[in-house]
Amino acid sequence: MTTVFLSGSITITRLNNVILARLQNIIDKQFVIVVGDANGADKALQKHLTTLQYPHVTVFCARNVCRNNLGNWSVKHISVDATITGRAFYTQKDKAMAQLADYGFVLWDGKSPGSFNNVLAFLKQRKKALVYFAPDSAFYPVSSVDDARTLLDKCDPAAVTEIDKKIKLTATLQTLDGMAQNTLSFAAPSPDERKQRYYEATRNHNYRASLRLEGL
Protein backbone atom coordinates (compact mmCIF):
# COMPACT_ATOMS: atom_id res chain seq x y z
CA MET A 1 0.00 0.00 0.00
CA THR A 2 1.23 3.51 -0.85
CA THR A 3 2.70 5.42 2.08
CA VAL A 4 2.96 9.22 2.27
CA PHE A 5 5.18 11.13 4.68
CA LEU A 6 3.45 14.33 5.85
CA SER A 7 5.71 17.04 7.25
CA GLY A 8 6.12 20.79 7.39
CA SER A 9 7.43 23.92 9.02
CA ILE A 10 6.70 24.73 12.63
CA THR A 11 5.44 28.18 11.55
CA ILE A 12 2.56 26.64 9.59
CA THR A 13 -0.16 26.07 12.17
CA ARG A 14 -3.31 26.22 10.02
CA LEU A 15 -4.34 24.33 6.91
CA ASN A 16 -5.98 26.50 4.24
CA ASN A 17 -8.31 25.24 1.52
CA VAL A 18 -5.45 24.71 -0.94
CA ILE A 19 -3.74 22.35 1.51
CA LEU A 20 -6.96 20.63 2.55
CA ALA A 21 -7.89 19.86 -1.05
CA ARG A 22 -4.58 18.10 -1.69
CA LEU A 23 -4.74 16.29 1.63
CA GLN A 24 -8.21 15.06 0.74
CA ASN A 25 -6.77 13.35 -2.34
CA ILE A 26 -4.52 11.29 -0.07
CA ILE A 27 -7.44 10.41 2.19
CA ASP A 28 -9.74 9.49 -0.70
CA LYS A 29 -7.12 7.05 -1.97
CA GLN A 30 -6.78 5.54 1.52
CA PHE A 31 -3.01 5.97 1.51
CA VAL A 32 -1.06 5.09 4.64
CA ILE A 33 0.21 8.22 6.38
CA VAL A 34 3.32 8.66 8.49
CA VAL A 35 3.69 11.93 10.35
CA GLY A 36 5.94 13.42 13.00
CA ASP A 37 5.05 14.63 16.47
CA ALA A 38 6.22 18.25 16.28
CA ASN A 39 4.18 21.38 16.82
CA GLY A 40 3.33 23.50 13.80
CA ALA A 41 2.51 21.66 10.58
CA ASP A 42 2.73 18.18 12.14
CA LYS A 43 0.22 19.09 14.81
CA ALA A 44 -2.10 20.87 12.35
CA LEU A 45 -2.07 17.84 10.05
CA GLN A 46 -2.75 15.52 12.97
CA LYS A 47 -5.64 17.69 14.11
CA HIS A 48 -7.31 17.51 10.71
CA LEU A 49 -6.81 13.76 10.43
CA THR A 50 -8.28 13.36 13.91
CA THR A 51 -11.36 15.36 12.92
CA LEU A 52 -11.85 12.99 9.99
CA GLN A 53 -11.14 9.96 12.21
CA TYR A 54 -8.70 8.76 9.57
CA PRO A 55 -7.29 5.44 10.79
CA HIS A 56 -4.30 4.77 8.52
CA VAL A 57 -1.79 6.88 10.44
CA THR A 58 1.43 6.16 12.30
CA VAL A 59 3.12 8.83 14.40
CA PHE A 60 6.91 8.77 14.51
CA CYS A 61 8.67 9.97 17.65
CA ALA A 62 12.32 10.24 18.66
CA ARG A 63 13.20 7.92 21.56
CA ASN A 64 10.38 7.39 24.06
CA VAL A 65 8.93 10.90 24.08
CA CYS A 66 5.96 11.57 21.79
CA ARG A 67 5.01 15.24 21.89
CA ASN A 68 1.79 15.02 19.88
CA ASN A 69 -0.44 12.07 19.00
CA LEU A 70 -3.85 13.68 18.75
CA GLY A 71 -5.58 10.68 17.20
CA ASN A 72 -4.12 8.06 19.53
CA TRP A 73 -2.71 6.26 16.49
CA SER A 74 0.01 3.66 16.52
CA VAL A 75 3.43 5.05 17.39
CA LYS A 76 6.85 4.24 16.00
CA HIS A 77 9.69 5.16 18.36
CA ILE A 78 12.97 5.83 16.57
CA SER A 79 16.10 5.04 18.52
CA VAL A 80 18.53 7.95 18.64
CA ASP A 81 22.03 7.84 20.11
CA ALA A 82 22.23 9.60 23.47
CA THR A 83 25.06 11.82 22.21
CA ILE A 84 22.91 13.31 19.43
CA THR A 85 21.17 16.58 20.30
CA GLY A 86 19.58 19.58 18.61
CA ARG A 87 18.44 19.43 14.99
CA ALA A 88 20.24 16.14 14.38
CA PHE A 89 18.10 14.51 17.09
CA TYR A 90 14.87 14.99 15.13
CA THR A 91 16.53 14.47 11.75
CA GLN A 92 16.92 10.78 12.62
CA LYS A 93 13.13 10.46 12.89
CA ASP A 94 12.59 12.28 9.60
CA LYS A 95 15.11 10.05 7.81
CA ALA A 96 13.25 6.96 8.99
CA MET A 97 9.95 8.28 7.66
CA ALA A 98 11.46 9.32 4.31
CA GLN A 99 12.94 5.85 3.88
CA LEU A 100 9.63 4.17 4.63
CA ALA A 101 7.40 6.42 2.53
CA ASP A 102 6.79 6.32 -1.21
CA TYR A 103 6.04 10.03 -1.50
CA GLY A 104 6.52 13.22 0.48
CA PHE A 105 3.92 15.89 1.27
CA VAL A 106 5.72 18.93 2.65
CA LEU A 107 4.29 22.22 3.90
CA TRP A 108 7.19 24.68 3.65
CA ASP A 109 7.38 28.31 4.72
CA GLY A 110 10.40 29.02 2.49
CA LYS A 111 12.69 29.34 5.51
CA SER A 112 12.64 26.13 7.53
CA PRO A 113 15.80 24.07 6.91
CA GLY A 114 14.29 20.92 8.38
CA SER A 115 11.32 20.84 6.02
CA PHE A 116 13.48 21.43 2.95
CA ASN A 117 15.88 18.78 4.19
CA ASN A 118 12.97 16.34 3.98
CA VAL A 119 12.51 17.29 0.33
CA LEU A 120 16.20 16.59 -0.31
CA ALA A 121 15.91 13.27 1.52
CA PHE A 122 13.32 12.14 -1.01
CA LEU A 123 15.45 13.23 -3.95
CA LYS A 124 18.40 11.27 -2.56
CA GLN A 125 16.22 8.16 -2.72
CA ARG A 126 14.92 9.05 -6.19
CA LYS A 127 11.45 9.66 -4.78
CA LYS A 128 9.07 12.55 -5.36
CA ALA A 129 7.65 15.16 -3.03
CA LEU A 130 4.74 17.55 -3.34
CA VAL A 131 5.72 20.83 -1.68
CA TYR A 132 3.33 23.53 -0.53
CA PHE A 133 5.28 26.79 -0.79
CA ALA A 134 3.59 29.11 1.70
CA PRO A 135 4.73 32.45 0.15
CA ASP A 136 2.90 31.49 -3.08
CA SER A 137 0.05 29.57 -1.42
CA ALA A 138 0.65 26.93 -4.07
CA PHE A 139 1.93 23.39 -4.46
CA TYR A 140 4.95 22.44 -6.55
CA PRO A 141 5.99 18.88 -7.47
CA VAL A 142 9.66 18.19 -6.79
CA SER A 143 11.15 15.18 -8.56
CA SER A 144 14.60 16.49 -9.51
CA VAL A 145 17.40 18.69 -8.24
CA ASP A 146 16.34 21.30 -10.81
CA ASP A 147 12.87 21.39 -9.23
CA ALA A 148 14.50 21.92 -5.83
CA ARG A 149 16.57 24.80 -7.17
CA THR A 150 13.48 26.38 -8.71
CA LEU A 151 11.89 26.47 -5.27
CA LEU A 152 15.01 27.92 -3.70
CA ASP A 153 15.08 30.66 -6.34
CA LYS A 154 11.70 31.79 -5.01
CA CYS A 155 13.11 32.30 -1.52
CA ASP A 156 14.80 35.24 0.13
CA PRO A 157 18.55 34.84 -0.56
CA ALA A 158 19.26 35.45 3.14
CA ALA A 159 16.97 32.54 4.05
CA VAL A 160 18.76 30.28 1.57
CA THR A 161 22.10 31.26 3.12
CA GLU A 162 20.81 30.25 6.56
CA ILE A 163 19.47 26.96 5.21
CA ASP A 164 22.86 26.27 3.64
CA LYS A 165 24.60 26.80 6.97
CA LYS A 166 22.29 24.45 8.86
CA ILE A 167 21.87 21.52 6.45
CA LYS A 168 24.90 21.82 4.10
CA LEU A 169 22.60 22.69 1.23
CA THR A 170 25.27 23.40 -1.38
CA ALA A 171 27.05 20.10 -0.79
CA THR A 172 23.77 18.16 -0.91
CA LEU A 173 22.74 19.78 -4.20
CA GLN A 174 26.13 18.90 -5.67
CA THR A 175 25.64 15.29 -4.59
CA LEU A 176 22.23 15.25 -6.24
CA ASP A 177 23.74 16.74 -9.40
CA GLY A 178 26.16 13.82 -9.49
CA MET A 179 23.33 11.33 -9.04
CA ALA A 180 21.44 12.95 -11.91
CA GLN A 181 24.48 12.71 -14.18
CA ASN A 182 24.89 9.03 -13.33
CA THR A 183 21.24 8.42 -14.14
CA LEU A 184 21.61 10.16 -17.49
CA SER A 185 24.65 8.09 -18.37
CA PHE A 186 22.55 4.93 -18.05
CA ALA A 187 19.63 6.30 -20.03
CA ALA A 188 18.68 4.59 -23.29
CA PRO A 189 20.41 6.24 -26.28
CA SER A 190 18.36 8.12 -28.84
CA PRO A 191 18.15 6.83 -32.46
CA ASP A 192 20.77 9.39 -33.54
CA GLU A 193 23.07 8.32 -30.70
CA ARG A 194 22.67 4.68 -31.68
CA LYS A 195 23.61 5.50 -35.28
CA GLN A 196 26.69 7.43 -34.12
CA ARG A 197 27.77 4.57 -31.84
CA TYR A 198 27.36 2.08 -34.69
CA TYR A 199 29.44 4.28 -36.98
CA GLU A 200 32.21 4.63 -34.37
CA ALA A 201 32.20 0.91 -33.61
CA THR A 202 32.45 0.05 -37.31
CA ARG A 203 35.24 2.58 -37.84
CA ASN A 204 37.19 1.24 -34.84
CA HIS A 205 36.73 -2.34 -36.03
CA ASN A 206 38.07 -1.48 -39.47
CA TYR A 207 41.00 0.41 -37.95
CA ARG A 208 41.92 -2.51 -35.68
CA ALA A 209 41.69 -4.88 -38.67
CA SER A 210 44.10 -2.71 -40.65
CA LEU A 211 46.58 -2.76 -37.75
CA ARG A 212 46.44 -6.54 -37.63
CA LEU A 213 47.15 -6.68 -41.36
CA GLU A 214 50.21 -4.51 -40.80
CA GLY A 215 51.44 -6.87 -38.07
CA LEU A 216 50.90 -4.39 -35.18
Image (cartoon, helix red, strand yellow):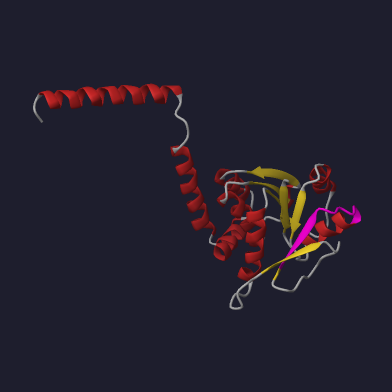
Viewer-side residue, 61 vs 20: 61
* Residue 96 drawn above or below residue 212: below
Region rendered in magenta: 51-61
* Residue 35 drawn above or below residue 3: below
How many numbered marks, from 0 up? 0
Residue 95: x, y in percent? 62, 60
Residue drawn at point x = 14 percent, y = 27 percent: 211
* Residue 122 drawn above or below residue 96: above
Residue drawn at point x = 31 percent, y = 22 percent: 199
Viewer-side residue, 53 vs 170: 53
Q: Is residue 127 found inside the magenta-colored segment of the image? A: no
Q: Is residue 111 visible?
A: no
* Residue 166 drawn above or below residue 204: below
Residue drawn at point x = 74 percent, y = 56 percent: 34
The quarter of the picture where residue 157 lies is bottom right
User: Which residue is farthest bottom?
Assistant: 83
Quadrant location, the C terminus: top left
Residue 16: x, y in percent? 84, 50
Residue 138: x, y in percent? 74, 45
Residue drawn at point x = 77 percent, y = 47 percent: 31
Viewer-side residue, 76 vs 200: 76
Residue 166: x, y in percent? 58, 65
Q: Is residue 152 visible?
A: yes
Would you say 155 lies left or right of 177 here?
right
